[in-house]
Image: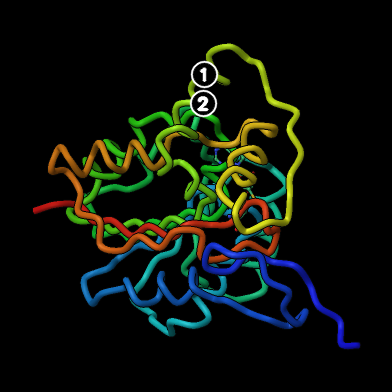
Amino acid sequence: MPRRTLVAVDGKYRFVPPNFVKETLLATVLANLTEETEVVVELGSGWGRNLFNVYLRCRRGDLRFVACEPADAGRRATELLCALEDGIPFAVHPFTYMEPDLSFLEGGPNVLFFTSHSIEQVTLLDPRLFDLMLERTAHCTCVHAEPIGWQRHTPLAARAREIVATGTIPDDKLSFDDEDFAENAALYSWQRGYNIDLLSIIDRYRKAGKITVKRLEYDFWGANPFIPATLVVWEKAG
Ligand SMILES: C[S@@+](CC[C@H](N)C(=O)[O-])C[C@H]1O[C@@H](n2cnc3c(N)ncnc32)[C@H](O)[C@@H]1O
């Protein structure tokens, strides 16, 4: 029998071949590059996997790429890989969501930001990040691939706030039942202190007229089926 692996795809658990690829993040980042884009920034970039892929696929010599990462090892790995190509237009910066600093963006450029499973790492996101992205750019678009789909369910969002307030983490068990898809993703996040508020922050900035949400695709993909990424694309309003 051919080998299969369990993943989350489009809000369901599915067994797929090991070489199954759903490249929505990369395709979405590439689709949101415009002629005006000057800088591509990944926040929480790890060793630079995604950013290198964007660079290799887009074939645009006019763009600058910025890898923002808190871990020394991640930044060092990115720098070592950059050293393999002369003149690669990459910069690497220390960065943390706990104290966001985008001062490396000088002169108000046009920026395409993206995040992939990095905001998940902070339980509560400092909303100043959004203010900085808007203030320090002439125009910006941001693509998120983060496991936040469960946050759209009001009872789960309320339970998450209660868990953070009380520190009492439920020890319920995960299941492989599609009916429990959102509850599983929520539980998995709560047990690991993952993010609980990105979706509500996006909604707040949208309602305040500061950003426009261009795309929202819940639970599109999870190589780990219990942390399915939701895709959000927003851009600075006006
Ligand atoms: C699951 S990895 C994802 C890495 C990369 N984005 C990718 O998709 O390959 C999580 C990343 O979030 C970063 N991270 C953890 N805490 C962070 C924080 N407070 N601020 C910014 N990034 C953080 C980690 O260092 C790591 O690079």
Q: Amino acid at mark 1?
A: Glu
Color style of the picture: rainbow
Identify the amino acid type marked 2: Arg
The x and y percentages for residue 151 are 45, 41
Q: Residue at x 29, y 66 (%)?
A: 38
Judging depth in this view, the residue of 7 and 46 nearest the camera is: 7
The label number, if any, that marks residue 159 in the structure image: 2
Q: Is residue 186 above or below residue 163?
A: below
- Residue 147 image position (x, y, % from top left): 54, 50
Q: Provide the residue designation for mark 1.
A: 162
Q: Quadrant of the N terminus?
A: bottom right
Assign a secondary structure to mark 1: helix
Q: CA distance from mark 1 to mark 2?
A: 5 Å
The local crowd at label 2, few if under 14, some if 14 to 19, many if 20 or more residues have their Cα within 10 Å, is: some
Q: Is residue 173 above or below residue 79?
A: above
Secondary structure under the numbered disc 2 in the rendered image? helix
Query: Are dots 1 and 2 in contact, CB under 8 Å?
Result: yes
Looking at the rendering, which quadrant does residue 30 occupy? bottom left
Residue depicted at 52% across the width and 46% down the height? 93
Q: Few, some or many C-alpha atoms within 10 Å of disc 1 (few <14, some 14-19, many ≥20)?
A: few
Q: Is residue 75 left or right of residue 156?
A: right
Which residue is at 76% across, 39% downward? 173
Most distant residue in the bottom direction: 1
Residue 162 lies left or right of residue 34; in this view the side is: right
Frontmost residue, 58 versus 159? 159
Q: Is mark 1 within 8 Å of ligand 1?
A: no
The mark tally for this picture is 2
Q: Is residue 229 above or below residue 134?
A: below
Q: Is mark 2 within 8 Å of ligand 1?
A: no
Q: Residue 53 or 237: which is nearer the viewer? A: 237
